[in-house]
Image (cartoon, helix red, strand yellow):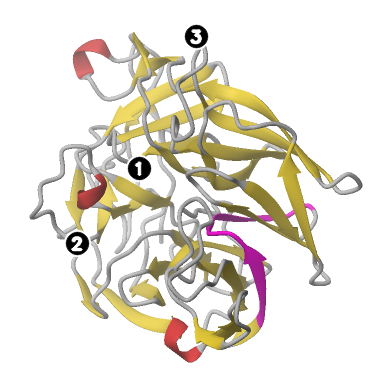
Amino acid sequence: MLTGRAKIFTAAGVAVAGLTAAGTFAAPAMAAPAQSYPAFTAKQVLYGANLKHANSKTGARETLTGPGGITQYNGNLYTAFQNGVGLQGQASSSGNRDSTIVEFTPGGSVLAQWDIAGRCDGLTADSATGEIIATVNKDENSSIYSIEPGGGIVHYAYNESLPHKGGSGSVSIYKGTVLVSASAPGTAGAAAPRPGYPAVYSVTLNQNTKVATVKPYFYDESAAMIANDPGNLGAGVKLALTDPAADGVVPSGVPRWGGDFLLTSQSDKVQVYSSGPGSLWELKLSQAVAGTVFPTSAFGSLYVTDPASDTVDVVKSQAFWTDSTFVAVTPCAAKNASSSCAANYLGLLNQVSGQISAVTVTGANLQPQSMTFLSTGGQPSILPLRL
């Protein structure tokens, strides 16, 4: 039987530790215990090589490649295959300019698929409307789509050139608001005068006008508080984000950051946790990461996109600790990455120290990019994560 955590607060008022747990699968207090966690096995469940779409230029049937974002809704999963499209929407080597979003069951049976123009990096589900929301072209020439419950696609143009001079990456629904990461800042030009580039936008979708109106949520240089320097915990710091990439919403029961919005600046090895645009905490990481996911029950599965094999994989364990934080570690994406950097791997993040430990996974040769957690019985996670 699993029991909940008791938060312990420092003088700064931050929950940094504390555990009341008993039973077979209870974890040490936020220690990213890779060695003592029940064993993990991975299996490929969705194969791009077995799926096809029509090339947007030639009409020829092509296999799907490059799965990016992944999310879930109503017990089913959705992932976006990028099909060789460039970061700014450039055509693939075969002339194709479309990504393909695939809906599938937990067992890998395909239910539906849709082609959208551009390279789809961000994908989430709006539980209030049943819509799947997708962003395309993370470096420049970006726009946003929604897929309605009946299968209709609505394409929205942003109401202005994005002020951070880049594209839009991940997308989440936080407290009823669509939030989009401002990826690849500076691709199209220099920063505006201070406060500089937005790191995250709130986005309002107007279905009648097909316009997505953006408003800065917080900035690459916003004021924040230090989250993992024991001598300076809670002290002020100015963010210096250069790669806002992945975002998500932390489930309310997660220790320390429960209920917060999460932004990961991948190459900077930084995560920003926020309960609102004026409350930001900077957690420095030991490694660069892409997707982050928090198990919402003891029993369920991680679903992981793996662009290296053009598959979606399922990761299972005897049980998941609901105080765990899993990350897709991306060593080659770090600013200081060496030419001999390692391939992506699954890791466990210590929410206090920012240290990441590797998770041993048997079965498929897993190289994760984006992840979501599906509770047993198809209960939807509230953390839709994509890159």
Q: Position of residue 370 (x, y in %)?
A: 42, 59
Q: Residue at x 43, y 38 (%)?
A: 184
Nearest the viewer among 164 and 309 is 164
Given this view, does label 1 or label 2 mark the residue nearer the observer?
Answer: 2
The residue singled out by tag 3 in the image is 194
Q: Amino acid at mark 3?
A: Arg
Q: Main secondary structure of the magenta part?
A: strand
* Residue 47 can be seen in this image: no
Residue 343, disc:
2
Q: Residue at x 44, y 35 (%)?
A: 187
Q: Residue at x 38, y 48 (%)?
A: 323
Q: Position of residue 302 (x, y in %)?
A: 42, 67
The residue singled out by tag 1 in the image is 20
Relative to 70, residue 165 above or below: above
Q: Position of residue 172 (x, y in %)?
A: 60, 45
Q: Residues within 10 Å of mark 3 (few under 14, many from 20)?
A: few
Magenta span includes 193 = no
Nearest the viewer among 164 and 359 is 164
Q: Which residues are magenta?
A: 112-128
Q: Residues within 10 Å of mark 2 (few under 14, many from 20)?
A: few
Marks 2 and 3 sit apart, C-alpha to C-alpha, by 37 Å
Q: Amino acid at mark 2?
A: Ala
Q: Residue at x 19, y 61 (%)?
A: 343
Secondary structure of the residue carrying numbered label 3: loop
Marks 1 and 2 sit apart, C-alpha to C-alpha, by 36 Å
